[in-house]
Amino acid sequence: MATRKRVAVVGTGTVGSQAAWRLASRGAEVVAYDRFAPGHDRSAAGGETRVFRSVQTDDGRYVPLVRRADTLWGRLQAETGRELRRLTGSMFMGPADDPEMRTVMDVIAEHGLAHEVVGADVMAKRFPQFRLDEGDLAVLDPRAGFVRPELTVQTAARRAEELGARIRRYTPVREVSPVAGGGVRIRTDADVERFDAAVVTPGPWVGDLLPDLPWRVDVYRAISAWFLPEDDHRAGAERPAFIRMGDTHFYGIPSPDGLSVKLGLSQAHHRLVDDPNRLNRTVSPEELETFTAMVRRYLPGLNPDPVRLSAYMEGYTGSTRPLVGPLPDCDDVILLAGFSGQGFKLSPALGDIAADLALEGRTSQPIDFISTLDRATA
Ligand SMILES: Cc1cc2nc3c(=O)[nH]c(=O)nc-3n(C[C@H](O)[C@H](O)[C@H](O)COP(=O)(O)OP(=O)(O)OC[C@H]3O[C@@H](n4cnc5c(N)ncnc54)[C@H](O)[C@@H]3O)c2cc1C
């Protein structure tokens, strides 16, 4: 009989909590560590909502991974009875000749994705909350909506515990090191433990934990702002998530309260974070001005004074393609990091891929384009 593999998971945030669930589901003995506790709000996950969408704006190679994630979102919901995701649709808006909009249409055509092109008349009647510019295209992705980050992380972590995983809360891992002849050693302030493999998902702390990583991951601070409609009618009966592309680039997500909308900005507006332990969570009036201008121009039904603000941080690679796979000097250490603003929707699939790599050394999911194998350094 095959022996049960012992696998460490370092970081029980977005991807680590899913990895713990998938590993425990597949019979591994799992010990997971977090410097805080599942569902905390000091890292990349939090702020009530994240977008889930089937249509991709930058690279169609994510589509099969999103499909796998879609299936696993359903499975985690079914296993736990929690509403982790709500499918509201997602609207893509921008100049028809914008490169990102072209990618949207190419990805839809290449993968045969469900969609609806929404003309200006229909837009005004069905979606009065959005204003289009002359020459804009609007496309609705119906297999899209929002997921709940805090609830998802806690639910995946709890499900992993129900399946036998142990989570060491408030236990920062100080070192992950390969053992000669195979396996991995995990050092905390309290002890050193040995495992067959480790899944390492430290989010913005990847540079702290793995200072010799041959790939660069820069940490950025990303802010969000919540707005209320001026009146309930103008909020729109249908409330899809949305992304505006072109010169003015931002996205919005309907809140679970059924009324407010959370807006977020593209990477160009994010600020570098020198030290993930000292994230500046105060949003300045100058930063707010960016949101106010966008609301006034494109979201006529919203009151431009925000009712809530937040700051989180995320690791970005130079190419924005995440790092998924073994470390160069150790096949037993599986790294998943640098999600560059798109990790949440994919997280159940990423957790499953982590389990494949830690337990079997390979995965059938098409990850060549994000794999650490044969990846150039820097
Ligand atoms: C404002 C914002 C909006 C976003 N919007 C979207 C969106 O709409 N859709 C989407 O798909 N993605 C979105 N993203 C991206 C997505 O949220 C991230 O890609 C994802 O959360 C990253 O997950 P992670 O597991 O790498 O990091 P995290 O979720 O931050 O998890 C890392 C965990 O590791 C722990 N940890 C770190 N170091 C150690 C250590 N040494 N020992 C023990 N534990 C440790 C941390 O405490 C943390 O719990 C957004 C990101 C931000 C910041």
Image: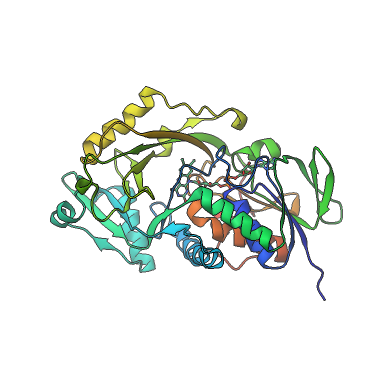
Name the quadrant of the N terminus. bottom right
- Above or below, comparing residue 59 to residue 169 in the picture: below
Q: Nearer the viewer, residue 219 or 280?
A: 280
Taking the view exactly as shown, the residue that stands out farthest to the right is 181
**Residue beneath the point at 27% across and 33% down:** 304
Viewer-nearest residue: 351 or 362: 351
Apparent side of residue 275 relative to residue 249 in the rendered image (left or right): right
Residue 3 percent across, percent down from the top left: 82, 69
The one nearer the camera, 6 or 368, is 6
Judge left or right: residue 295 versus residue 36: left
Q: Is residue 91 above or below residue 294?
A: below
Return the x and y of residue 322 as percentages of the image width and height: 55, 49
Is residue 122 in view? yes
Can you see residue 343? Answer: no
Left or right placement of residue 261 versus residue 323 in this view: left
Residue occupying the point 66% across, 57% down: 20
Q: Position of residue 369 (x, y in %)?
A: 54, 56
Q: What's the residue at 56%, 54% (across, down)?
A: 370
Q: Position of residue 245 (x, y in %)?
A: 31, 45
Image quadrant holding the C terminus, namely: top right
Which residue occupies 24% across, 41% down? 299
Quadrant location, ligand no. 1: top right
Q: Which image quarter: residue 44?
A: top right
Left or right of 324: which side holds 282?
Answer: left
Instruction: Name the residue nearer the viewer: 266 or 51.
Output: 51
